[in-house]
Image (tube, helix red, strand yellow):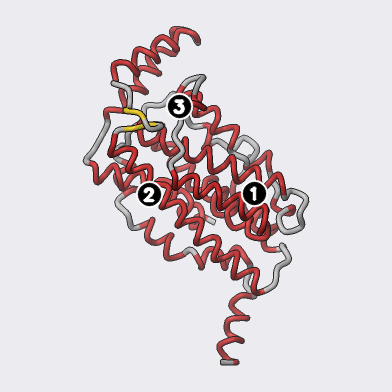
């Protein structure tokens, strides 16, 4: 028993970033081995699923960043507080306005699983702030790394404008060198003071973050299978095209073809099984690829 405890203590003496990578290795491998990457690279993704993903990410990041702001001066989080470099809420707001229009706040759905994730983030921020770094690390550094790969693929598959509309989430203007920034973030995280018991709880919370992500996409799949957004049937494609063409003239006729093409890409649908794999894997793969890249 004593030998086992000694071995455990030695293992937990590693840097927190290394422990985090090891603790989430199994989930990472599951994400790596899904058909998602091959299918995504072939452009087998629809605008409908992409919009639903973006909407859920908005609720998740809004909650995460609200709790980060609450704890920005707390020693258990302050060293990894990088709002200008990492925060995604404002970027997601731009993407949602692009996809849904000016009334996007009334249009986007928040499935029960997404709400569950949001509630967990608020619970952590208010009652267990020492665990907040687990959510921040797995999300932000995953998006910063793996998200850049998905950005290029999504832009091509969905025929999004080369000027970046609809992809602000993937754009980190405050980070000029991703590799150096990740090194800085990792070193700051490793310097956080926490005892052995707290480290174990942080690692468990990181795994829980992955599980919450998967549950979010299970709920999104139900919306997709029912052909719904925000509890209502998805608009006919002709209506979507008409609404966007009219909106495009507000920004000049040069935008018309880009926005019309963006709506046409919603017809790029594969079998329900492949669509399910794509949606389920999107967020988990973003995080997993990011952790692997670090």
| Residue at 44%, 47% in the rendered image | 113
Q: Nearer the viewer, mark 2 or mark 3?
A: 3
For label 2, the residue is: 281
Contact, CB < 8 Å: mark 2 with mark 3? Answer: no
| Residue at 39%, 61% in the rendered image | 29
For label 3, the residue is: 107
Q: Nearer the viewer, residue 222 or 37?
A: 222
Q: Nearer the viewer, mark 1 or mark 2?
A: 2
Say what secondary structure mark 2 lies in.
helix
Residue 226's quadrant in the figure? Answer: top left
Q: Earlier in the sequence, mark 1 or mark 2?
A: 1
For label 1, the residue is: 181
Q: Position of residue 88 (x, y in %)?
A: 58, 38
Q: Nearer the viewer, residue 211 or 152?
A: 211
Residue 46's quadrant in the figure? Answer: top left
| Residue at 51%, 56% in the rendered image | 209
């Amino acid at each position: 028993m004593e030998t086992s405890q000694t071995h455990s203590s030695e293992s937990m003496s590693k840097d927190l970033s290394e422990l985090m990578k090891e603790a989430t290795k199994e989930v990472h491998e599951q994400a790596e081995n899904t058909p998602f990457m091959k299918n995504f690279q072939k452009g087998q993704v629809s605008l409908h699923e992409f919009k639903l993903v973006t909407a859920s990410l908005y609720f998740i990041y809004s909650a995460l960043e609200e709790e980060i702001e609450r704890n920005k001066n707390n020693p258990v989080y302050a060293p990894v507080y990088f709002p200008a470099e990492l925060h995604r809420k404002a970027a997601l707001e731009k993407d949602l306005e692009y996809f849904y229009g000016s009334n996007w706040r009334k249009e986007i759905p928040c499935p029960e699983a997404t709400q569950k994730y949001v509630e967990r983030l608020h619970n952590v921020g208010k009652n267990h702030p020492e665990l907040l770094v687990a959510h921040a690390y797995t999300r932000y550094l995953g998006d910063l790394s793996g998200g850049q790969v998905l950005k290029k693929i999504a832009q091509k598959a969905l025929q999004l404008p080369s000027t970046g509309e609809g992809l602000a989430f993937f754009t980190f203007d405050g980070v000029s060198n991703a590799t150096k920034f990740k090194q800085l973030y990792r070193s700051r995280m490793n310097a956080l003071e926490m005892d052995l018991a707290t480290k174990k709880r942080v690692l468990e919370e990181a795994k829980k973050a992955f599980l919450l992500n998967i549950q979010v996409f299970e709920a999104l799949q139900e919306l997709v299978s029912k052909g719904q957004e925000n509890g209502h049937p998805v608009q006919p494609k002709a209506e979507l095209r008409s609404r966007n063409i009219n909106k495009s003239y507000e920004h000049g006729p040069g935008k018309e073809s880009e926005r019309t093409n963006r709506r046409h890409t919603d017809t790029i649908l594969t079998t329900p099984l492949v669509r399910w794999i794509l949606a389920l894997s999107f967020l988990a793969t973003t995080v997993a690829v990011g952790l692997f890249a670090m």
